[in-house]
Image (cartoon, rainbow, N blue to C red):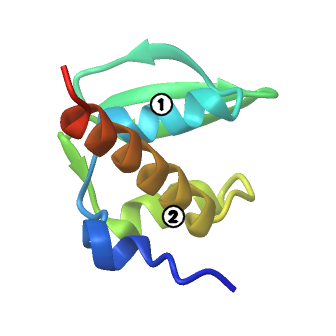
Amino acid sequence: MSNFHPREIFGNVYPVKRERFERFLSLHNFTGVMVTEKYSIYEKDGESIEIPRNSELTKTQVSDLLNLYGTSVDEFETFVYMELMVEKSAINSPK
């Protein structure tokens, strides 16, 4: 078992930026189809998901949205931690 604990390194991922959540959906073959004043709408296999347009989403919002489509919050959080590691390494890399 790994001694790597991303939550200890990066802290809690929530609230999470809507744009990061939308990237996660895109990687899972959701396609953005419409933006309204209140929602971004994504579709996959004839199913649609409405993401509130506020700038950040809570864990409850993310969980509710992902549970509708059989995707786990753990998978999303792993994605976020991987993005955070890439961002941190880019900031710390020599120029």
Tell whether 10 sits left or right of 28.
left
Q: Residue at x 41, y 70 (%)?
A: 6
Q: Residue 16: x percent and y percent? A: 28, 53
User: Circles 1 and 2: CB distance less than 8 Å?
Assistant: no
1 or 2: tag closer to the N-terminus? 1
Rendered position, 49 above or below 94: below
Q: Dot 1: what SS?
A: helix
Residue type at tag 2:
Asp
**Depth order, front residue of 95/30:** 95
**Res 89 quadrant in image:** top left
Disc 2 target residue: 64
| Label 2: how many Cα within 10 Å (few below 14, some 14–19, many 20+) | few
Disc 1 target residue: 23
Image quadrant containing the C terminus: top left
| Label 1: how many Cα within 10 Å (few below 14, some 14–19, many 20+) | few
Residue type at tag 1:
Arg
**Res 27 quadrant in image:** top right
Q: Residue 29: x percent and y percent? A: 71, 27
Rendered position, 21 above or below 95: below
Q: Residue at x 52, y 18 (%)?
A: 32
**Depth order, front residue of 13/34:** 13
Whole-angstrom CA distance, mark 1 to mark 2, is: 17 Å
